Amino acid sequence: MLTKRDIQIQSEQIGSLATLVEVYGQIAAERMIKIRGAVLRNRVFLNAINEIFTDTLASYAKRLSNLLNSGKIKAQENGRVTFLAHNGKTVSVFISANTGFYGNVIHRVFAKYLEDLKKDPNIEATIIGRVGRAFFVESMPNTPFTFFDIPDYGISPSALDEAIKHLVQYEEIRIYYAEYKSVINQEPTKRSIVAGTPIQRQIQEPKVEYIFEPSIEAILTFFETQIFASLFDQSLRESQLAKYASRILAMQVAQDNINKRRKELAIQKFKISHQINEKKQINSLAPLFACKF
């Protein structure tokens, strides 16, 4: 049973923990608000860019077909054309975190990542975040992987460029991250990016005729590199938003547990005080009983 001194020590520790939880919660809320607007706007922007890209595909489908027929370019086995050098491999990317207190969302993303990774031993692994590195080393200690240290808040351009240079060489890139649905809902998400531009076998007349300058090759290269960079950057920001939303929930759960423990300690303190008072009363009455006998 706890002593009065034990209760005092635990109460002080819980008080310090409550302050820490409150600070973490406030910081997470402020950062989530800052990130959320940009992420939601970027979703709309990327959808618009994708629509433009899809529209231009029809316009230069005939020109690509002519280049293929003339032997100037070759299509890959997957029916795509690319002007970038790729190694023909697939890489699986896990976007995690550098610190804790994000609830269980990182564990849930990693579970999905690990499940898919184990299905194909030929897929190469890339980990972003120190927490993810610890998870991976513990789960697959003998599996090689590439690691990138990208901050949980904000994105370092140099770190982002380094990661993109590594990933863009792969034929297919699978990105696993947490996606923000709402403040109370963050879901593990997989985004697959396949290198190259798909070739349309049945060429339709485009709605809009485009003039390509300086060349189709330059346009394709631009779309392939820039769209990938934008999608990867958006995945990182989506992950950051989801993590801070998850942290807010985790801090709320921690605060509820702290309040519950405070009530338990208060009850125990009351019981101890009651027992002490009972002993004092018994001791004060003991001489009276002794006189009677």
Image (tube, helix red, strand yellow):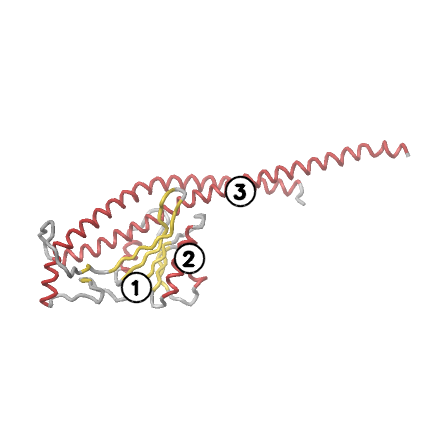
Q: Is residue 281 left or right of residue 9?
A: right
Measure how far apart labels 1 and 3 are at the Cα level: 44 Å
Helix, strand or loop at label 2? It is helix
- Count the marks: 3
Residue to which mark 3 is pinned = 257
Q: Are marks 1 and 3 in contact (CB under 8 Å)?
A: no
| Amino acid on which the number 3 mark rests in the picture | Asn
> Quick one: label 2 or label 1, which is nearer the N terminus?
1
Residue depicted at x 82% and y 32%: 285
Using a 10 Å C-alpha cutoff, classify the residue at mark 1 as few (fewer than 14 neighbours), some (14 to 19) or many (20 or more).
many
Amino acid under disc 2 = Ala
Whole-Å distance between the Cαs marked 2 and 3? 26 Å
Task: Name the image quarter holding residue 197.
Answer: bottom left
Would you call the spot at circle 2 few (<14 residues within 10 Å), some (14-19), or many (20 or more)? Answer: some
Please identify the quadrant where the N terminus is shown: top right
Residue 252's x, y, as percent?
Answer: 47, 41
Q: Nearer the viewer, mark 2 or mark 3?
A: 2
Q: For mark 3, give the secondary structure.
A: helix
Residue 90 is marked as 1
Instruction: Tell me what residue is drawn at x 54 percent, y 39 percent.
Output: 259
- Looking at the image, residue 171 sits to the left or right of residue 292; the answer is left
Q: Is residue 280 above or below residue 49?
A: above
Q: Which mark is residue 111?
A: 2
